[in-house]
Image: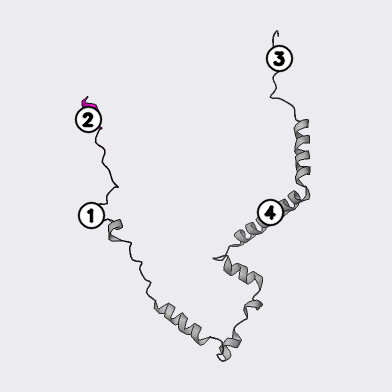
């Protein structure tokens, strides 16, 4: 019966981390605040200079509506893509459009009818012929 006594002890409670206080008892960790770098400060001051009502710099900027779609798509896609990546994306979009157009031609009822016709035409190779007496 010594084996039974070895497994009779059941410790309770949650696991403890080594060292220091438990984060539950100490409270939540404080979030670190980002320090503003000199680049951020320069951008903010530049933006303030280009604010509406400023002189000729505001007129030189393009209106957001005048930006062409290709440039916008290139900027929003992240880093510049290589020629192969652009070609791959074009072919993928073209194939997807073709597939959607092909699937949109048939209604659900037509798809079910076609599926049933195909099943009727298949050979029933899973049916085993009866062998032997009986």
State the predominant SS element of the stretch in magenta.
Answer: loop
Q: Picture quarter containing residue 30?
A: bottom left
Q: Nearer the viewer, mark 1 or mark 4?
A: 1
Q: Element type at marker 4?
A: helix
**Disc 4 from disc 2: Cα separation:** 67 Å
* Mark in front: 2 vs 1: 2
How many angstroms separate mark 1 from mark 4 (CA)? 57 Å
Instruction: Check disc 3 and report its element: helix, strand or loop.
Output: loop
Residues tagged 3 and 2 counted as in contact (Cβ below 8 A): no
Which of the pair 105/7 is nearer the observer? 7
Contact, mark 2 vs mark 1 (Cβ under 8 Å): no
Label 1: element kind: loop
The residue at which mark 4 appears reads as 96
**Mark 2 highlights which residue?**
5
User: Which residue appears farthest toward the left when viewing the image?
Assistant: 2
User: Does 112 sit above or below residue 103?
Assistant: above
Identify the residue at image location x=69%, y=12%: 131
Relative placement, left or right, of 109 versus 128 is: right
Q: What residue did someone put label 1 on?
A: 19
Q: Position of residue 2 (x, y in %)?
A: 21, 26
CA gap between label 3 and label 4 equals: 48 Å
Residue 66 magenta-highlighted: no
Question: Callout 3 environment at 10 Å: few (<14), some (14 to 19), or many (20+)?
Answer: few
The numbered mark, 3 or 1, whose residue comes first in the sequence reads 1
The magenta stretch spans which residues?
Answer: 1-18
Q: Give the alpha-carbon distance from disc 3 to disc 1, as whole Å.
A: 76 Å
Residue in the picture at 48% in, 84% down: 46
Q: CA distance from mark 2 to mark 1?
A: 32 Å
In primary-sequence order, the first of circles 2 and 1 is 2
Does dot 2 land on a helix, a strand or a loop?
Answer: helix
């Amino acid at each position: 019966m010594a084996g039974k006594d070895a497994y009779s002890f059941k410790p309770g409670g949650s696991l403890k981390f080594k060292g220091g206080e438990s984060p539950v008892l100490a409270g939540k960790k404080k979030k670190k605040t980002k320090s503003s770098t000199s680049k951020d400060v320069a951008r903010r001051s530049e933006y303030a200079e280009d604010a509406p009502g400023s002189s000729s710099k505001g007129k030189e900027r393009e209106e957001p509506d005048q930006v062409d779609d290709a440039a916008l798509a290139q900027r929003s896609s992240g880093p510049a893509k290589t020629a192969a990546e652009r070609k791959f994306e074009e072919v993928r979009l073209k194939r997807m459009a073709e597939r959607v157009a092909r699937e949109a031609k048939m209604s659900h009822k037509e798809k079910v009818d076609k599926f049933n016709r195909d099943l009727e035409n298949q050979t029933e190779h899973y049916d085993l012929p009866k062998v032997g007496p009986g």
